[in-house]
Image (cartoon, helix red, strand yellow):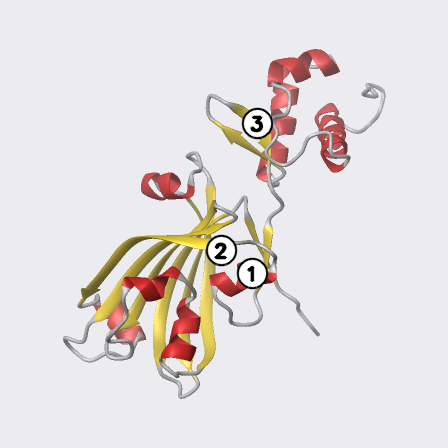
Amino acid sequence: MLDKHSPVPMYVQIEEHLKLRIQQGEFSIGAAIPSERELTEMFGVSRMTVRQSITNLANSGLLYREKGRGTFVAAPKVEQPLSGLTSFTEDMLARGLTPSNVLVGFEKMIPELDIAQKLKLGEGEEVFLVKRIRYADEKPMAIEKTYLPVKLVPKLNKDALNGSLYSFIEKDKQMTIGHAMQRMEAALVTKEDSNFLQINMPSAILIIERISYLTNGLPFEIVHSTYRADRYQFLSEIRR
């Protein structure tokens, strides 16, 4: 099954073997693969070698681990282009996935100075702070914290947050969304966010801050998004 005379390391051969079995449908999405002990006996290698193979496949997003349960085949990552300004709901629908969300926070508040400055708010002007867990096909994908100036959407309510916020702004409020600026960084998940996203600690996450503007140049939202790195990847086309 493995070529012990090959210059290709054993752990790489095991990775390729497992990838092939997944591609051929022997292990479907969500199915458990054999345990480390079973794979050790199957390939006649050390447990450390098997563990390295599994870790590499998990880091690449092909597998995921659940503490006390085992290792499972992951769903393909959602690809998100970095060009084009769309909402999470629009993104998921475009990919044939069913979006949903759970509202875990909704309040009116006076924002911190940096938020107020980015939204060009005057002293004492309030924002709505919305915190939602975003799902695709009932699986948690991201946590979103959104700041919206109250003066722009004074009648924002929980019902409007069940679907696409962009749809509410453009269709219900008759405002036109223009462009956004965003920055991205990698981090390790916090304890609280690991519970929301249903991932173990430590796990990698992608953090994006986006400031979105109407066509008249007025900023209408700041979104802090925390994405599962094992379920999401971002694509960018670069031209010379």
**Nearer-the-camera pick, 87 or 200:** 87
> Could you tell whether 17 is left or right of 75 in the image?
right
Is label 2 in contact with label 1 (beta carbons under 8 Å)?
A: yes
N-terminal-most mark, 3 or 1 = 3
Give how far apart the Cα atoms at labels 2 and 3 are: 26 Å
Counting from the top left corner in percent of width and height, residue 121 is at 24, 78
Counting from the top left corner in percent of width and height, residue 18 is at 72, 29
What's the amino acid at mark 3? Answer: Thr
Q: SS of the residue at dot 1? A: helix
- The residue that appears at 37% across and 60% down in the rendered structure is 162
How many numbered tags mark residues here?
3
Q: Quadrant of residue 28?
A: top right
Number of the label disc, if any, that sits on residue 93: 1
- The residue that appears at 54% across and 44% down in the rendered structure is 230
Number of the label disc, if any, that sits on residue 228: none
- The residue that appears at 54% across and 23% down in the rendered structure is 70
> Could you tell whether 232 is left or right of 125 in the image?
right
| Residue occupied by mark 2 | 99
What's the amino acid at mark 2? Answer: Pro
